[in-house]
Image (spheres, coloured by chain):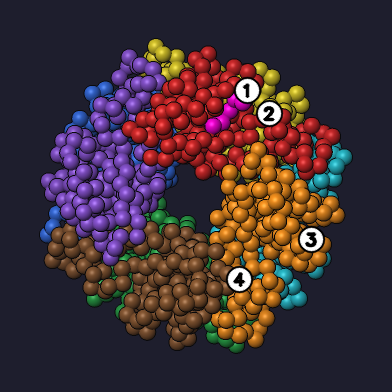
Chain colours: A green, B brown, C purple, D blue, E red, F yellow, G orange, H cyan
Amino acid sequence: MAFTVYLSGEIHTGWRDELVKGCRERGLDVDFTSAVTDHAASDAAGDSLGKETNPFWRDHKSAKVNAIRTRTLIRQSDLVVIRFGEQYKQWNAAFDAGFCAALEKPYITLHGEDIIHPLKEVDAAAMAWATTTDQVMEILEYVTTG
Amino acid sequence: MAFTVYLSGEIHTGWRDELVKGCRERGLDVDFTSAVTDHAASDAAGDSLGKETNPFWRDHKSAKVNAIRTRTLIRQSDLVVIRFGEQYKQWNAAFDAGFCAALEKPYITLHGEDIIHPLKEVDAAAMAWATTTDQVMEILEYVTTG
Amino acid sequence: MAFTVYLSGEIHTGWRDELVKGCRERGLDVDFTSAVTDHAASDAAGDSLGKETNPFWRDHKSAKVNAIRTRTLIRQSDLVVIRFGEQYKQWNAAFDAGFCAALEKPYITLHGEDIIHPLKEVDAAAMAWATTTDQVMEILEYVTTG
Amino acid sequence: MAFTVYLSGEIHTGWRDELVKGCRERGLDVDFTSAVTDHAASDAAGDSLGKETNPFWRDHKSAKVNAIRTRTLIRQSDLVVIRFGEQYKQWNAAFDAGFCAALEKPYITLHGEDIIHPLKEVDAAAMAWATTTDQVMEILEYVTTG
Amino acid sequence: MAFTVYLSGEIHTGWRDELVKGCRERGLDVDFTSAVTDHAASDAAGDSLGKETNPFWRDHKSAKVNAIRTRTLIRQSDLVVIRFGEQYKQWNAAFDAGFCAALEKPYITLHGEDIIHPLKEVDAAAMAWATTTDQVMEILEYVTTG
Amino acid sequence: MAFTVYLSGEIHTGWRDELVKGCRERGLDVDFTSAVTDHAASDAAGDSLGKETNPFWRDHKSAKVNAIRTRTLIRQSDLVVIRFGEQYKQWNAAFDAGFCAALEKPYITLHGEDIIHPLKEVDAAAMAWATTTDQVMEILEYVTTG
Amino acid sequence: MAFTVYLSGEIHTGWRDELVKGCRERGLDVDFTSAVTDHAASDAAGDSLGKETNPFWRDHKSAKVNAIRTRTLIRQSDLVVIRFGEQYKQWNAAFDAGFCAALEKPYITLHGEDIIHPLKEVDAAAMAWATTTDQVMEILEYVTTG
Amino acid sequence: MAFTVYLSGEIHTGWRDELVKGCRERGLDVDFTSAVTDHAASDAAGDSLGKETNPFWRDHKSAKVNAIRTRTLIRQSDLVVIRFGEQYKQWNAAFDAGFCAALEKPYITLHGEDIIHPLKEVDAAAMAWATTTDQVMEILEYVTTG
């Protein structure tokens, strides 16, 4: 059984690569998609449309260009995995969770025990909470081959 | 023209009261709704269903009981105002924004200039960004009486 | 805050009356709706359309006439409470749960600990699991007045 | 004409194998999908996410992990066949029926005459009621090649 | 319990009046709505927009003006009753049935035994088939007061 | 540009074959689907599920089995062509038109000038009205290759 | 029968007032809603959120603030009347038409014969085309009292 | 990552060809679709269904035949690019924008600075505004390969 999994959230650690590599080693029929994860490129996504002096509008344009990609990929996915790390606000990850919840798109959260409480609304609408990429792979293996 | 506005986000400052009082003074036909904003009561929302030893499950139960109220009120509202303050993770506020975006429910964000960048995806899907409650009232007055 | 609550499931015990009376005593602004709970009348709901010799078709006609009422009331409700008792198959109650899940209509289950395992899929999609009508009232009081 | 059929319900008898084998023998262009039907594996679906001492939460986690698979497969199917046997509560099968009804996903029930009455609401929303796997195959042959 | 019932189909007999009068006598809380049932006025509904020499376009304009009323009323109703008589093609009645089926709006058919076969697809998607207005009233009384 | 066209209505003349053959000769990339058009087989579609003494229920079962096929094919199509001939009631064709209208599935009607008036509601919701299969082919050629 | 009608398009002539006054004189139970029609106020709708040096962003902010009002009112209306005049681009009026078409919200166009050709796509999805406010009133009277 | 892009608007300049050629040169995995862009053929799209003496009905028929193609292609696309030029009313382009907005289909506008103000509502609902085809290609390259 083939599955397409969208990976949302933290872009400064190697969790995406771990998942992609691990699932390949397990021989799972899973395709992964993602936002553009090059931080500088993502922030500059709208710059080709003309420079902005006001940082709000620069961000605004880039966020919308990125959304052309991310909204489409989220809608096309069978499952979303959303990673919350220790740094940064990561409001876009929580935004993706709310977006999935309203669309009835199943998602799994991936985060440590120390942020259980602030993530309680996000976790309450998730299909599972994992703390390691190995756990996510276990779930993916079960779901697609079980 | 009557409007129902759901107020989401920060619960530790007086912004909700300011809005309610200010709109009353302006004579606007606006009803405000909200999650339960008593922090302790909200965290304990699921306790009546039985105590949990594991904090994850306590949070889980409370978050779902709260969602019975909040999802219904968000769906019934004409507009959502989402406040991001300087403290706390506020992932539930960003979750509400994503939820609204997917439901095509218009929302306004209310936050300072210092957090423009981490909120860029949230702001990109909003109908407006305000920095003060007075600005929100201006918008509400324009929209309902203009 | 007004709430409309649809009561689904077991019709041979007094749990509906307990809830209605208890919420009135607490002064809650909650309206309750329900299928026709007179068992004999419900089984005969389609008889006025002509007698059937085959019991399958008698049931079929009655079930559809009942659905005219129940589907409308479920769609109009803000919350559904689904009671599973110790007797009978109660597949219609589980059917209502699945119906609510697909419509994103929030529901609470009400049942004893002894049937946790066979109800795990039904409970997994619920917003809460209660074991007593008092617990349901606590939730309703919190949600509508909290 | 190709058809994807999701098989829901009873996991302790060989009805799934009968259908798969029979349709292959008839040369039908039908793909079958299903939940994980290994009972022990299904009950343990969430165990890799961490052990639970409370059986309710163990069931809860496993039911949600299973739902990642089943909801996706039900949505992708053209038809659902739901089997009710003589044993067990099978509330998950009735839940699937209600879920299909709300999504307008056509389903067929497969059960004996002795449980017509308790299944009347489930049958009333079905496209057909069959008592044998041969009958289901007849329908599948008619629908896909007729 | 209040119900809004849209009456579709045959306009040359008194079945609408029978239903309205009978339900009033029974004291039912039912509101009835309908297309414009004055045949000549209905055919001329679009004439005020300018005369047409081609009868196709005259019909086209009138049918669309009528649809402004009928689509809105069908969407606002809780139940639709669709009457097929012995005369005329009544394709608009069958069209309304298909429209209701796709919207999941419950409907009851009202017609004699002699046209069971040509109406089989229409009846198959209905919640009930009645042969007399008394039967329809029985159902309405059961559904709204049972 | 590939197109899937569902052919609904009249089964006693050769219009389907004309369309299929004509489009092949024109080299159009159009796939055609249809209900089972063998009248006797269609009427008997539910017989394998057990004989019925009451003709209403025999029709009921067959109509629902046919709907498993037809609803799926209509939903999968890009366009529906609905043929009304001179004989029979053809309420199922008008039902399909209403079903398409509510789903926003574009459809073309194919019928003679003599039945313009009784089909005015059906035509008013159509994207085109054709009187010959050649006209339908012209439209299909324009739409897919223009 | 009560109707809510949203008036879209041209703001420099008195057609809105004519309609409101005319319908009152006819005693019709019609409520009218509209965007803010004070041109200068509408262009400045977002100014309270902070001045912009770039005219694109000033327009952007104002257009979104206006959309908070207009999208809500369009969704709440039963019918939309869209006026195209002789001056200005009026792309927002055509935008509203497309918005209504996708939402299945019925709309009437109101414009002269000289702009039939450029409005053909807009008119093709409309329920009627009127050239005078008197014609619109005729339709409203027919639809609500016919 | 493959993307399907629907090109809407201006048909009298070479912007479509520039985009198709430029994306091919960049090696992007993008498919382009469009309405029929032969102006005379498009205006005559309905002529094969019979000549009309009234230009309104000729336009009406052609616009609907064109919509069979365009609505389907817009729904199948991942992104829509809408070009507004210096000539013509182009209300159909603004109509497409409104249609996309209501369907939550992301779109980009392509137009010069001189028409920013009249397009403010159209731009406010867009994901990006570009002034050159090179900018559109930059966005497509970023979105599909970034």
As measured in the structure, the alpha-carbon distance from the residue carrying label 4 to the one carrying label 3 is: 23 Å
Kindly identify the amino acid type of the residue bearing the numbered disc 3: Gly
SS class, disc 1? loop
At a point 20% along the width and 51% down the height, the residue shown is C22
At a point 60% along the width and 63% down the height, the residue shown is G70
Kindly identify the amino acid type of the residue bearing the numbered disc 1: His
The quadrant the C terminus of chain E occupies is top left
At a point 72% along the width and 25% down the height, the residue shown is F115
> Does the CB distance between marks 2 and 3 fall below 8 Å?
no
Kindly identify which residue carries mark 3.
G85
Dot label at residue E39: 2
Kindly identify which residue carries mark 1.
E12
> Does the CB distance between marks 4 and 2 fall below 8 Å?
no
As measured in the structure, the alpha-carbon distance from the residue carrying label 2 to the one carrying label 3 is: 35 Å
Which numbered mark, 3 or 1, is in the foreground of this view? 1
Q: Is residue D55 above or below residue G63?
A: above
> Does the CB distance between marks 3 and 1 fall below 8 Å?
no
SS class, disc 3? loop
Kindly identify which residue carries mark 4.
B146
Residue B92 in the image: x percent, y percent? 35, 70
Write down the region rendered in magenta.
E7-12
Which numbered mark, 4 or 3, is in the foreground of this view? 4
Dot label at residue G2: none
Horizontal arrangement in the rendering, residue C144 relative to residue C112 (left or right): right
Say whether residue C52 is visible. yes
Kindly identify the amino acid type of the residue bearing the numbered disc 2: His
